[in-house]
Amino acid sequence: MVVKFKQQRDLFESERSFRLLVEGVADYALYMLDPAGIITSWNIGGERIKGYRPEEIVGQHFSRFYPETDRANGKPMRALGIARDHGRYEEEGWRVRKDGTFFWASVIIDPIYEDGELVGFAKITRDITERRDTQLRLETMQKQLAEAQKFDALGQLTGGVAHDFNNLLMIISGSLHTLKKGTSEDAKLQRAIAAIETATRRGAALTSQLLTFARRQSVNPQPIRFAERIEAIREVLHTGAGSSVQLAFNIDRNVWPIRADVSELETGLLNLVINARDAMPDGGTVTVSARNVVLSEILHAGEFVAISVADTGLGIPSDVRDKIFEPFFTTKPIGKGTGLGLSQVHGFAHQAGGTVKVESELGKGTTFTILLPRETAEPRQDRSPTLSRGSGTVLLVEDNPDVATVSTGLLEQLGYKVRRVPDAEAALREVELDGIDLVFSDIVMPGKMDGLSLAHRLREIRPELPVLLATGYSDAAADARGDFPILRKPYEIHELSEAIAKLPR
Ligand SMILES: Nc1ncnc2c1ncn2[C@@H]1O[C@H](COP(=O)(O)OP(=O)(O)OP(=O)(O)O)[C@@H](O)[C@H]1O
Ligand SMILES: [Mg+2]
């Protein structure tokens, strides 16, 4: 008997101290709900945080702590449902105090069972408004810091990119000099032409990287099959890798389609391959691979295609690792690297809804992996990369006489007759005369009407006439996106040929 009494007393004591503990906790609102959500107990923390005395709140429905909109859409009862079905409900969100003010709450709801039957819920609420404010302030400061760093980086632009461009211009003007002098030596002539070609390509790559950095590039994402695309890119990558390193491919033929801007993808891979080459001064192997992966990360969950470029080079030191994706970060000597390669890769991957990861081990090598979401739309059949010869008359609308001469040359090489006008008004007059099979117009032009308005006007008066637009300005391209096909300047003959071949007729 005595023993039983002692047990009961102990139980009573422990229950009492537990109740005191719960009631006395001031930093947490700890209280109970019945299965329908009616408040059945209250503690000092609840009073302190929400402002209600126990006699005011016990017996009320807990939904009164929620903001009006949450109550209207049934969030409180949904929370109880989740706690019941999943064993716990947890969230951070706005709640309302008795005086109508809001606080940011961390909320946990646990279901309570007795003999297998739901008897109610335990609710723990904490006021973390201050922590959230601190967090937000920190984020704002981080953003400001990032802005400041960006300005810093833009300052370095003068040093890095301008230097690179000057070199390219040197090469071009020097080679032009050779051409102008009129040498009879064929080898010299070819060398000069090749030098100009390389410099132009490098210049175009540089602007394309700058534009991606500025995130204003007119990207033209389309469903593609990487396994097929890589065939066309192979050659470019071989050139990028150079002769000192091996280039290997390991592409799963069944790799899912992805959605990306083809030339961005090509530039990204080229950047990675060139980096890999630079990391292997004593030679080695670069392996480009692609495979399907299923991810379950918070930001990236679902089906992805993983495109990797792996090298067997120096690896990335840990103090460098955090900075490599920053624009203009480079460890290479002036004139060798601008530090834009990886920021292009990063910009591209994120624009395409994916991400990029890096694994590296000092002395062993580095693997960059671009993860791109699986595309469900079927890619169009790849056209053969050979130039399709055209026929008919192209109306070229271009105000710059030098560009016009170059474009005319390219169009004629493709087999077209070319009529040339300097602006939109002249173009409309020319179209009236008939005999035009296709209009190829610059977007940004002097005069009242730009290329885009011209294209819209032509669609009204001559809907069957195909129109292709060209521009070097990404903003102009963005305005027209979707309405008319656009060729980005500078373009090469095969791009022009492809763009014309793709025109709806
Ligand atoms: N595969 C790699 N192995 C080792 N280090 C690398 C590798 N790829 C990149 N890095 C490091 O990251 C830095 C930044 O690379 P990023 O491609 O952005 O610029 P860069 O190659 O220096 O110049 P750019 O690509 O503009 O010519 C490099 O300077 C190098 O230090
Ligand atoms: Mg690089």
Image (spheres, grey):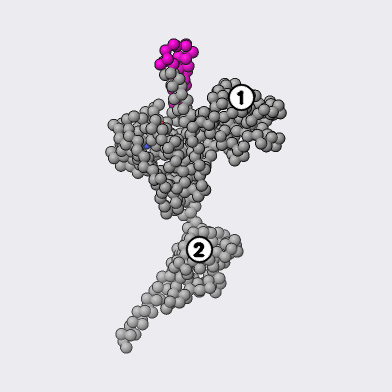
Amino acid carrying mark 2 in the image: Ile
Q: Is residue 180 magenta?
A: yes
Determine the main secondary structure of the stretch shown in magenta. helix
Region of the chain picked out in magenta, as a range: 162-189
Q: Nearer the viewer, residue 46 or 120?
A: 120
Which residue is at 51% across, 29% downward? 492
* Residue 488 seen anywhere in this rendered image of the structure: no
Which residue is at 54% across, 74% downward? 59
* Residue 63 seen anywhere in this rendered image of the structure: yes
- Which image quadrant for residue 363? top left
Q: Nearer the viewer, residue 493 or 295?
A: 493
Callout 2 crowding tier (Cα within 10 Å): few <14, some 14–19, many ≥20: many
Residue on which disc 1 sits: 418
Where on the image, by quarter, is ligand 1?
top left
Which residue is at 61% across, 28% downward? 392
Question: What percent of the width, then of the height, locates residue 31?
Answer: 48, 70
The label number, if any, that marks residue 49 in the structure image: 2
- Is the C terminus in the top left, top right, bottom left or bottom right quadrant? top right
